Image (cartoon, grey):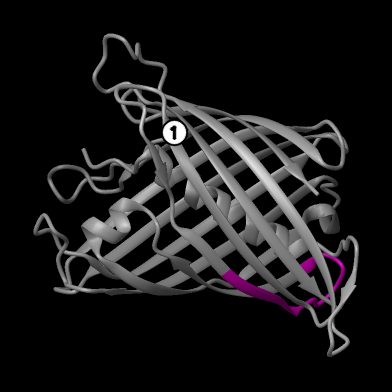
Amino acid sequence: MKRITSTLLILLLSQMAAAEQEASSNTTSVEKVDTNGTKLSPRLSLSSTLVSNRRDINKDPDAVFYNSTNFGLSLKSNKTYRWAFGVGFNKNLTGERKLDWGDGSVSVSRGLARPNEFWNISGKVSTIIPLAKSTKAYSELNGLIGIQPVVSWDASQVGAKGLSLAYIPKFTTYFYEHETNVYGSSNNQFKTNHTLSVDYSFTDKLSANFTSIYIRSWTHKGQRSDSFAFDQSVTYSLSSKFWTSVGHSIGGSAIGPNGQSNNIQFYDENLSTWYLSAGLTF
């Protein structure tokens, strides 16, 4: 069964969370003024995630156990734009315990419309800096362009205080050196992601999230593949700058081995991973 790796799943979910935060954030921090009079509010973030599939790392060759660390910098201007830069690495805690850098990310986003206090619409354009070995050496990716609108809704409009929903589609075009990677497999030319995120705040400090992602990819030869991902987490904010969360993720092929049956599932002993995260924002 085709599986979305834990690293990819965590990356997808972190990108989704960042997009949703950009859609709803109106906060600013220390302001700096450039020569054109534009005010910028910088914000630094650091997060670390420990991921496991709960298998014995000493006996099971399919055991997953690694740490993912990510750094981010965002600059929000008084002209409603936000620039974001990110980079991270993964440290395998099994086998040779290698450290692998992930791709860097660059994006710019801004609010597009706010019909009322309950609805918010924003847009985001993103690309990456190819740093990961799998991206540079294996896929030979030169770059990509991602377009990502975000539509969020505060359900207190209908009396459900603390509940919010966000729909985040994303359309990505890839630019590779070759149509196939070094192993002869076809590289993707286009990809669409459809993300639905549901958040519920029990208190100002305690919240829960459910996220579902459906991915459809097309190769240069027109071959299509469908994947899914689900994530459930509970987050506790110890302060305005420090948070921690625990969660479960699963991802894989949306189509069964016969090419027709539905393979979407919320839990599977062979596909599910569990994680513990902590983060700081300055």
11 relative to 156 in the view: left or right: left
Badge 1 crowding class, 10 Å Cα cut-off, few under 14, some 14 to 19, many 20 or more, is: some
Of 3 and 46, which appears nearest the observer? 46
User: To which residue does mark 1 refer?
Assistant: 91
Identify the residue at horizontal 44%, vertical 57% (top origin).
103
**Is residue 114 in the magenta section?**
yes
x, y (%) of residue 19?
A: 63, 61
Identify the residue at horizontal 53%, vertical 48% (top origin).
13
Q: Which residues are magenta?
A: 107-119
- Disc 1 is placed on an element classified as strand
Q: Main secondary structure of the magenta part?
A: strand
For badge 1, the amino acid type reads Lys
x, y (%) of residue 22?
A: 71, 63
Q: Quadrant of the N terminus?
A: top left
Residue 183 visible to the viewer: yes
Of 262 and 98, which appears nearest the observer? 98
x, y (%) of residue 252?
A: 32, 42
Q: Residue furthest front?
A: 35
**Is residue 238 in the magenta section?**
no
Identify the residue at horizontal 47%, vertical 61% (top origin).
194
